[in-house]
Structures are given as structure tokens and as C-alpha cells.
Image (cartoon, grey):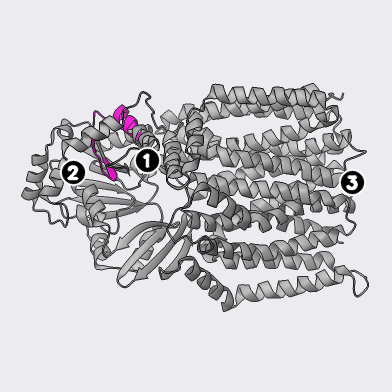
Amino acid sequence: MKALSLKASLLIMGASGIVAQVTLLRELLVSFLGNELTLGIILANWLLLEAIGSYIIGKSVERIKKRLEVYVFLQLFFSIALPFSITLCRAFKNILLATPGEGLGFAPIFYSSFFILLPVSLSHGALFTYGCKLYSLWGRENAASIGKVYVLETIGSIVGGLFITFLLIHYLHSFDIAFLISSMNALISICLLWPKDTPFLHIRNALLVFSFIFALLFIFLLFSPVSEKIHQSSIQHQWKGLNPVHYENSIYGNITVTQKGEQITFFTDGILSITTPVPDIASIEDFVHFSMLFHKKPDSVLILSGGAGGMINEVLKYPVARVDYVELDPLLLKLIHKFPTPLTQSELSDPRVKIHYADGRFFVEKTRQRFDLIFIGLPAPQELQTNRLFSSEFFSTARRKMNPGGIIVLTLPGSLTYISPELRGLNGCILDTLKSIFTYVRIIPGDTNLYFASDSGMLDRATTQDIIKRLEERRIPTSLFTKSYIEYRLHERWLDWFLKSMEREEVNINSDFRPLGVFFSLSYWNALFSPYLSKLFKWFEGLSLELAIGITAFLTVFFSIFFLTKPRLSGYSLPYAIFTSGFADMMLDLAIIFTFQTLYGYLYHQIGLLITIFMVGIAASSFFITRRLDRIRKGYVLFLATELSIVLFSLLLPFVLSIPSHHLEKTAVHVLLYVTFLVMSFICGALVGLQFPLAIKIYMKTRSSERRVGHTAGLLYGADLFGGFFGGLFGGVLLLPLLGLKDSCFMMAIVKMSSLLLILLFTRIQK
């Protein structure tokens, strides 16, 4: 076996893992109508399965003699499993008898993504453990070999992440990407097995033949029309009954276009976005005409998302001078132009309409324009990205960009029959936030609640007759928006009933650094699709820093007693430390990305740069410490120093990121804070990168007689991934929304202090 081939294989393993993860994640988000909760479930399942593969399957490496053959088998299995899993992503809804566009509950999302990811994640996790063992046999069996494999895999992940973010997504569909990755794995398998003098019927020769066959097959599929046929066939199956005519990915997500007769529908990540030429006219007329008629003379209008396909058309019925329309993804409007209808052609070609491809909040912060009306065309803050348009900080910014008498308008889910606790929580949170910024807030209850906020008393004073009079005077042609309809919608009984149903004691403000709107939105979504978990969400609603500290303290005491009564197991305090580091690392990285996105906008490539810098930190520090492992004498002391460093980093991070954010309008502060984000990302990755090789050295030294490379690599790598599993599942769904940035980071400091205490209690510091 050539050392160069093994190193190349480990690099490919890292690149394959990140590319497979991103590709399958994007596919599953389309099927699951992705939000923050589904994203967390999918990422958590990936990490959980990788951890199981690394530890459970990886344990066999010490018993099996033909380790290279098993390693190659896992590579070939991974290469077959990836395109198979993509096929399952697009077919499973039909297996579950669910229709395209239909939402799924927590349980179907969890077990579907678990089984879809299982063959890919499980085999990829096991590859790490077997790779560590093979590398140790090529060199020598010590901790440094595992550290070097960790570095090589991380470098491969960096390269793979950059390629899929900036290149592959732009030019290849999911099956092309899968066949490319699969062919690379098959080709490197040939290099690992060739040349070798073995008997003709030896298993190694059989694997070599299979490697040749699979390499040729995947290369053929990649460069032949067959790949496109598989891709199109799976799309037709995925969107069965809706006649998909176009399916395309951008860096922001997936857009699918379906057509039935003359009706064209655009789906964004599986969610219905636009229907033309006959849109949902009732909702659009409600949203637009009440807003335009509450204002005495609207002249300048800003629409943040959702404007094409009817909304702009209704706004243009008024004598406005300018309509600024902001969409994040240029692909959406590109496809609207590709599949035009008279409605979309007329509204988007009107000279009064100015289209901006930008993050909505970023545009509002940077524009010098002032507006009479600002429409937020997003239904609810279901994720950290969209929450930024429902926070108190954004409302304050929007208020400064409004003309005197200006109104900001948004919608939230509602009901005229029953306000559930989840619906009350979501509406109450945004209502409290609007009231904290604006003098007047007016609500029109319905199946969709309309919210209007302004500092002008004319919003509050406008009567039903005023609205009817303005509609008649302006001679606005409408379909359903009539005098009797206005009287019905503005009848005081609806508002009285709504306000009585919304009565509650607590006040919840949705802010950038404590995005409660995300939690309440996900709680409502969960109540619709998984009502059996409502009590769990209600319990989590009471989560506080004090409770989190109490739980952490209880676990620390529990493990202390457990290790005291089971001295042989006290050595597992080290894997526990790696577990908490994986948990904290995922949480802190999410906090950095989330805060950057909040302050600077959804700048996709720059967020990709943050993630890359984070992984460079892991690779650089791992490489640095691995090169010096054999010379380190006080490994315990150094490991404890890294534990303490993570504690201090967790305590300092929220202050470093949030204090200068109030002065971003100053160029020097803007640049300084941007550089600070890059530095924090690097340090966050570097601290964990330092820990992993040190933990391996310590664990192997204390248990050298019973634990070898394979077991150590599988156990500690699995612990790291298992910690990431909890961080991915709870970080963006519970901790950041409920505790906020500052308390979430403080909780991570408490968690790391618990692992630090356990190591001090049960590990003798070597001098």
C-alpha cells in the first residue's frame, strides 16, 4: 500500500463527507419544507450516524486482519449509497403517501432523514476509524497517526466545502455531484489496491475488479445523458401529479416550477411561493389594499420579498411614484422571466418598479430612500435568517427609513375560531415587539392576521367608512375587496375577540440576540404537524439560564458519583470532555454565523468564508499540535489549558460581537468587527483542533494495555460528533432563540467547566 494513495484517500474522504452532507441536506430541505427545526434534525441525524459508524463499526478494526479490504469496501459502499440516498430523498414522500407541498411532522422527518442518511453517514463515519488504523500501520501505532488523519480529513472537508459552495452547485445537479464524488472514491480504491501479488481468487482482487467496474460506471454516468435522464425521472417522481417543467438549484436554495394548463406555480425549497396568472387574489388584495388605504397618499413603496405574481400588480393600481422590490435569490425572477405570464410581465416591466437582488435587511440599512409603506412579504420568522425582519432592531431601522405617516405591514398565521397557545405565543411575541418600537399598532384578525405599525395617529383613527371612501375616490379596480367585505373584515367584534383571546401576562420581545420569534414559530409549526410534542415545546418555553445551569450541575454530580463507584470507567471523563467540546463548538460556531448574518445580512459567500476559516482553524491547530505530540510531556496540563480556554472564549464571545454592533455605521468599526468575526471563527475551530490530538495521546497513554488506535479513534471521534449532534439539534431551535446569544454562550462556559472539573477529579495530572 502506498502512503501517497492513503493520504489522497483520506483527503477524498473528508471532501466526500462535506459534499455528501450539503447535497443531501439541500435535497431533504426541499422535501421537508425546511425550517430551523428540520435543519437541526437533519444535521443531528448526520452527526449521530457518523458517530455510530465511527465507534460501533470502527470497533471491529482491532479484530479484523484484512483492514485495507474493509476500508476499500466502505469506500465503494459509500460511493453506491450516495446516489441511492439522493433517489430516496426525492421518492420517500410517495412512499409515505404524502403529496408534494405537504408538510410533515417531527416523527416522519426524524425517521425518514435517519434512514435516508444511514448508509452514507454510517459508512463515512467508519472510514475515519479504519483510516486511522491503516495510517498507524503504515507509520507506527501512536496518537500522532490519528491526529494526522484528523488533519487530512479536515483539509479535505475545507476543499470539498469550497468546491460545492462556489462551483459544484452552480454547474451540476445533485446526481452529477454524486457521480463525481463516487467516481473519485472508486478511483482511489484502485490506487489503494494496485499493484499487489495475491492469489487469483483473493478478496483483494475481487475488490479491485469491483473498483474498476464502479469507476467506469460512475464516469460513464457523469459524462453521458443517462445522468440527466435519472435526474429528470426522479424529479417527475418527486413532484408526481404536478408536472414539473423546471428544477434548478442556486446558492440560496432550490426552485421548482410546475405547470397545469396555463397555471404556473413556483416552489422555493418545496414551499409554494408564486402562482400565476391566477394568484391567491383574496390574500393579496387583503395585504395590499388595506395597507394602501390606511395611508392618505402612498407614493413610495418597499416590498421585501414575495412581490412578484400579483402583489406588485395590486400596488401599481395606485398612483405611486416608485416601488422598490427586494428579492434575495436572482434565480426566482430569472425563472419568472423564463415562464412569463401577462401578469408578471406587466408588473415587472413597469418603469416605476426597481428590482434589487439583496438581503432585505441589508438593503433597508444601506438605502438612502424613504418610504410611505414597507411590506414584509414573509409569512413568519421560521428560521434565524427570516427572523431578522421581525426583530425589534429591524423595526427600529425600518422606522428611521419611513416618511412621516409611514406604515410597516406584515402578516402572521391566524384564526377566527380558536387561538391556540402556540398561535398566541407567536402573534403575541411579534405584537409585543411592534408595540415596543411604534406608537400605534393596528391588527385585522383573520385566517391570516394583518399587522400595521406606525408613529402616525392616522393609522389608529382611520375608520371603516374612511377606508371605503378612499377606495371609491381612488377608483381602484378589485375582485373581492368590496365595500361589504371591508365592513366584514373591520367589524369590531373580530378585534375584540382577538384581543381577548390574546390576553396573557408575559411580554416577549423578539430581538436580534434573543430571537424568540423563531421558537414560537417552530412551536406553532410543530403543533400543526406533530401535536403530540406540544407539551414538550411548552416545557422548553420555560427554559432559562438558571434551569440550564441546574441541569448541567446535576449531570456533573451524577457523573462524579458514577465514576467514583465505577473507578474503571473514570477514564471516560476524557471522552466526556470531547463530547462537551463538540457540543460547545457547534453552538459557538452557530452563534458566530447567526450574529454575523444578523449584523451584515445574508451574504452567502461570506458566511461560506466564515465556515472555511473555522475549519482552517481546526486543521492548522491540529497540524501544529500533532507535529509536536511526541515531544509533549505534560499533556494533561495542556489539555486542561485548552478546556479553560474554551470556557474563557465562551464568556468573551458575546461581548466581543455585540458591543461594537451599535456603531456599525462607522466605517472603522464596520471593518474592525468584520475582521473580528473572522478571527473568532478561526479561534473557535483552533481550540477544538488542539484538543482532539491531545485527548488521543492522553487516552492511549492511560489505557495502552487495553486500548489501541482503532478503539481510541472511534471513541473520541464519535464523542466529538455526538456532541455536535446535540449542538445541531438544540442550538438553533432552543438555546439561541430562548436564551439568546449572551446566555447561550454563558451556558457553554458552564458545560465546559463541568468537563474540566471531572477531568481534575478523576485524572492524575502528569508532571
Q: Is residue 479 above or below residue 639?
A: below
- Residue 270: percent from left, percent from top: 44, 58
Q: Is residue 435 magenta?
A: yes
Give the residue displayed 54% in from the left and 70% down from the top: 231
Measured Cα–Cα span from mark 1 to mark 2? 26 Å
**Label at residue 489:** 2
Badge 1 element: loop
Q: Quadrant of residue 65?
A: bottom right
Which residue is drawn at the image coordinates 83% and 72% (left, top)?
A: 206
Q: Secondary structure at mark 3?
A: loop
Q: Quadrant of the C terminus?
A: top right
Question: Quick check: marks 3 and 1 in contact, CB under 8 Å?
Answer: no
Q: Closer to the N terminus: mark 1 or mark 2?
A: 1
Horizontal side, residue 169 vs residue 527: left or right = right
- The numbered mark, 3 or 1, whose residue comes first in the sequence reads 3
- Classify residue 153 as left or right of residue 410: right
Taking 185 as reference, is 676 left or right?
Answer: left
What residue does disc 1 label? 389
Region in magenta: 430-450
Q: CA distance from mark 3 to mark 1?
A: 54 Å
